Image (cartoon, grey):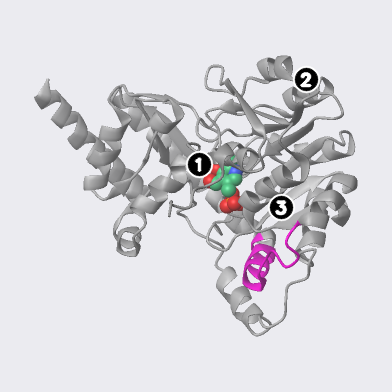
Amino acid sequence: MGEIQIKNTLQGLENKYIKRELKDSNESKEQLFIQLDRNENNFGFSKQVPGAINQAISESYIYTNVFGEPLRTELAHYHQVLPDNILVGNGSFELISLIAQVFLDSTSISLTATPTFAWYRAASLLVGAKVKEIALKEHAFPLRQLIEQVDSDVKLIWLCNPNNPTGTYFSYHELNDFLKEIPENSLVVVDEAYIDFVTTNENYSVAKLIHKYKKLIILRTFSKIHGLAGLRVGYALADNSIIEQLFSFKIPPNTNRLALAAARTSLKDRTHYQYVQQAVNVEKKYYYDELSKRQIRFIPSVANFIMINFELDSEEVVAFFQTNHLLVRGGKEYGYDQWVRVTIGKHSENERFFKVLDQLIDRVKVKK
Ligand SMILES: Cc1ncc(COP(=O)(O)O)c(C=O)c1O
């Protein structure tokens, strides 16, 4: 008897990220290693989160509200939209998959840039759509080039803003100009997972564009600045007609009580939000200064991670850091062969990063 195989359309397209996670997964490692490889928020969550979770435990025998209430209404206030404009999900991963399931089929093209967040591609392939990827321009989302690719088969366009892994950003006005040129039958998803780290006024303003463009879906998450990656809450903002279509096909109880309670509490704790935003910026400047001192190139980033060019095979760099108990993400899988993406951690973690980096530099000098 032959082996059970994944369906033909997915053969050879397995997600490299997941493969790497399988290889790396090991509890003791998570405890021993400094993790600067997954863009988590190492500054952690609001101090008020544990109390909120504790309170919510007693009601855990009851399913959550299918709309994610009362979080949904609180998010509506926060973004100055209506609750009908919001769909609460089990992290943005779930929402990306759901959007692909609801709007794409085997006749559709899903358009995005490369490199960007890999799940847009995986979610599109899973539902049989074709994926067209346009190279970044100067490490940034190539909005103009994407417009040139749009035809009636392009049903979905995925934009990542700020872009993971490059940390580059496009403004409200650039997005508005882009949306003006996209036909009404192509949906545009703007994934704003890292937008909270942008410290200009731009970081709150794009939500209001959902009133202007029915084709726009914005994704947000509690995994990054709120530090709740392990609890799984994300949400989509869009015109109520889009939200209704997505809602009809989502898993009804898709969130859990503890996560909803944590997210509600975190949303209210502006002090923690600002603390993380500021701490990441201070630490990012530390990276810029230390890298510049060593004449190492990097891409200036508006997010909580930074791409660094080591002018060495990125797999070797990752392995060197790993033997020194520090996890960073190699760029090879995205075609950035000599680049490594590093999440901005706490000061002691970042100091450790530069200690290991100096050992790497010494080793390379000796080899030469
Ligand atoms: C751009 C981007 N979108 C979405 C996600 C996933 O977010 P969530 O934890 O809400 O599923 C990530 C995770 O790293 C990401 O980098």
Residue at x 73%, y 18% (from the top left corner): 147
Q: Residue at the front extreme? A: 1
Which residue, given by chain and number where applicable, does mark 2 sit on? 151
Element under label 2? loop
Which one is in front in this view, the residue at disc 1 or the one at disc 2? 2
Element under label 1? loop
Name the residue nearer the viewer: 179 or 245.
245
Q: Give the alpha-carbon distance from disc 2 to disc 3, as whole Å.
A: 28 Å
The correct choice, above or below, for 319 with respect to 143 in the image is: below
Q: Residue at the left extreme? A: 366
Locate residue 288 relative to residue 358 in the image: left or right: right
Which residue, given by chain and number where applicable, does mark 1 sit on? 304
Residue 317 in view of the camera: yes
Residue 315 place in picture, x, y as percent: 30, 34
**Residues in magenta, as a range:** 250-266
Amino acid type of the residue that numbered disc 1 sits on in the rendered structure: Asn
Q: Give the alpha-carbon distance from disc 1 to disc 2, as whole Å.
A: 35 Å
Residue at x 72%, y 37% (from the top left corner): 189
Residue at x 49%, y 52% (from the top left corner): 41
